[in-house]
Image (spheres, helix red, strand yellow):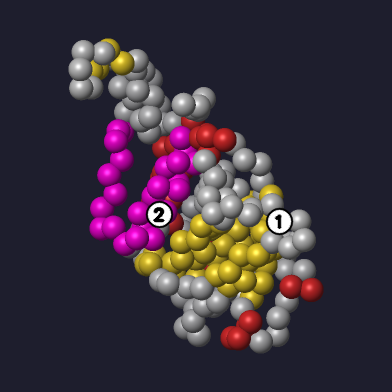
Amino acid sequence: MYTMDQVVQAKWIARRFLVDLQLGFDKIFYFHAVDLMERPYRQAGATVNAPVMMGLVHGGSYAPKYSFEVARRVCHLFDERTRRTELMCLFTEPDPSAPRHATLMAAPYAATFERDGAPLFAYWLGEDPQQRAGQTTIDAELWWDDRLAMPEPVLLDLLTGEVYAVERPPELTYTDWRTRGVKYRLPLTDYPIVLTDASVVAGLGVEWRDR
C-alpha cells in the first residue's frame, strides 16, 4: 500500500520481535531469510508476482541488509539472559494542554524485561512505520522491583546501535520513587528504543556507537 524500503522493514522487524518476546513466545519465525528474486512465484491463482524483497539478506548479492543488522541487534540483547518481567510504566504528554498522541493507535507501546539485575524498558510509538512519523518526546514514569537497579540509565537505539545517557530534568525527579516512580523525558520514535542501565550495554561485549 505504501512505499517500502529497508529502514521501514527494519522498524517492522524490531517491533514484531519485541511484541513476540513481550507475549512470551518460545519461538519466533520470520519469513523469509533471503529475498525471493531468482524466479517469479505464484500465490493462490495464476497471477505471477514480482520478486519479494522482505528478506534479511539481499537475494542477488547475499549481503546482509539493514534489517539483518537490526534483527541481530535485537537477538543479541534479548537472548537467554534477558527475561520477560512485568514492570509498570506510565506515559504522559510533556504538555497536557497540547497533546500530540491522543488516539489509541498513537499511544506508546512498552515491552518490559530484566537482564543481569537491571530493568529494560523497550517502547515505541504505535503508529504505522510506513507513515514515517517524526521523532517527538514523551514523559515516562517507571517502576521496578527492589532487586533491580538502574543507577546509570542509558538509551539504546535498536535501529542505529547508538547509546546515549539519559538526563532527568530537575522538575521531573522524585525523591520517593517507591510510590511515585522515576520520571524521564524521552525521545519517542515509531520503532523500539530501550531504556536500561549502562552495565547491560557494556556487558554485551560489543562496541555500540555513542551518540
Q: Is residue 64 magenta?
A: no
Towards the viewer: 51 or 60: 51
Q: Is residue 69 visible?
A: no
Residue 51 x/y as whole percent: 34, 18
Towards the viewer: 2 or 159: 2
* Residue name at image x 49 percent, y 52 percent: 206
For the residue marked with disc 2, what is the amino acid? Val
Residue 48 x/y as whole percent: 27, 12
Res. 195 image quadrant: bottom right
For the residue marked with disc 1, what is the amino acid? Pro
Give the vertical position of 182 relative to 196 (above or below). Answer: below
Categorize mark 1 by other alpha carbons within 10 Å: few (<14), some (14-19), many (20+).
few
Left or right, 72 with respect to 150, comes to left
Q: Whole-Å distance between the Cαs marked 2 and 1?
A: 26 Å
* Residue name at image x 25 percent, y 58 percent: 26
Categorize mark 2 by other alpha carbons within 10 Å: few (<14), some (14-19), many (20+).
some
Residue 58 x/y as whole percent: 38, 25
Q: Which residues are magenta?
A: 9-33
Contact between labelled residues 1 and 2, with CB atoms less than 8 Å apart: no
Give the labeled residue for mark 2: 19
Residue 86 x/y as whole percent: 42, 72
Left or right, 17 with respect to 109, comes to left
Q: Which mark is residue 99?
A: 1
Q: Is residue 6 visible?
A: yes
* Residue name at image x 67 percent, y 59 percent: 138
Most frequent secondary structure within the magenta stretch: helix
Towards the viewer: 160 or 30: 30
Count of numbered tags: 2
* Residue name at image x 51 percent, y 73 percent: 88
Query: Secondary structure beneath disc 2?
Result: helix
Between discs 2 and 1, the one toward the N terminus? 2
